Image (cartoon, rainbow, N blue to C red):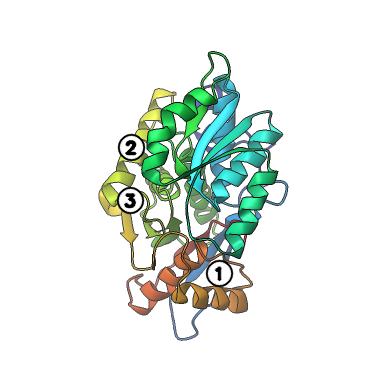
Amino acid sequence: MSVPLLHQYYPALSDTLPHLALGAAPTPLRQISLLPASDTEIWIKDEGVFGDGGWGGNKVRKLEWLLPDALRRGRRTILTVGGLGTNWGLATALYAGAHGLDTALALVDQPMDEHVRAQLERIRNSGATVHFTHTVARTALSLPWLLARHRSGTTPPYFLPAGGSSRVGLLGYVEVALELAAQVADGTMPEPSHIVTAVGSGGTAAGLALGLAMAGLRTRVVGVVVNDKLRLDEPGLLRSARRTERLLRERGAQLPESALTLDRLLLVRDQLGAGYGHATEPGRLAQQLAHDRAGLELEPVYTAKAMAAVLDLDRRGALNHGPIVYLHTDGPR
């Protein structure tokens, strides 16, 4: 079983922040050519191959830290939220169930298409208890009832926000940033100027920003906002990253003085389209291009919009010719 870099670099964390290996790290980096006219060096870090049992992506990275924390606290049920077609909710149900934990999901409406219908069927077959709360506001109002409903005796459920973007969940992408830094150090690729990722709940981007700062890389995180149901902005993501930084210090990590500043994060919003769950024409074009030129399978809600942002930013010269990393966070299609 591989030892996470966070435990290698900060041994005290192995006792205070347990880790459960659910996939094979490091995930690969490879260079691709998407636009022949572009001289930007584009690399893919493929999180789609991470995970045991055929599931990859950023959800599993977070669960590697969240599941053992729930077990350490003696919780029996994970309660979390997402859209009708939530990859996060499905991954939680599958991995939690494999480790003896129940899952309850509060699901918010999103546009219904074939992908969402298939995903909802997977969720129903996962063993999770499903509550259709329809809106973010109704979910918030229902939370006290949901917490009481899924209490086991005196033990409350382990509640997680959308995407698992708690201060423990962010550790999944602190780990990925340290992994990327190690790949830069061993010559796999040059230090990237930017790393581009979809932003649904913010945890992946915030964890990356913290991890890159801890590793001493100057790489800037570009988050492509795909969710209009949550408040997502750079100050909010920075606060999340700093909460996780405090957690690491509290649990015994002797961290250097923080280099975590607002300029490490940039959110772009021009790929959202009609809103969360709605496909876009630039996303469809990016899907096709990624398939044809890189053999990469993207889904329309997150990864296609992030790739569309890469192409748009490159055309506008906003990436300074890179090298850049496109983080393929994956998910069922």
Q: Position of residue 106 (x, y in %)?
A: 50, 40
Q: Quadrant of residue 131?
A: top right
Q: Residue placed at 41% from the left, 69% from the top?
A: 309
What SS does tag 3 mark? loop
What SS does tag 1 mark? strand
Tell which circle, 3 or 1, labels the residue nearer the N-terminal end. 1
Q: Residue placed at 35% from the left, 40% from the top?
A: 240
30 or 309, which is in the foreground? 309
Which residue is most to the top?
154
Total marks drawn? 3
Q: Is residue 125 visible?
A: yes
Q: Position of residue 75 (x, y in %)?
A: 57, 22
Q: Is residue 97 left or right of residue 205?
A: right
Above or below for 28 versus 91 = below
In the rendered image, which residue does mark 2 sit on? 242
Q: CA distance from mark 3 to mark 1?
A: 30 Å
Tell which circle, 2 or 1, labels the residue nearer the N-terminal end. 1
In the rendered image, which residue does mark 3 sit on? 232
What SS does tag 2 mark? helix
Disc 1: CA contacts within 10 A as few (<14), some (14-19) or many (>=20): some
Q: Quadrant of the N terminus?
A: top right
325 or 243, which is in the foreground? 243
Q: Position of residue 108 (x, y in %)?
A: 47, 48
Q: Position of residue 130 (x, y in %)?
A: 58, 40
In the rendered image, which residue does mark 1 sit on? 31
Amino acid type, residue under disc 3 in the picture: Leu
Q: Is residue 297 left or right of residue 196?
A: right
Amino acid type, residue under disc 2 in the picture: Arg
Disc 3: CA contacts within 10 A as few (<14), some (14-19) or many (>=20): some
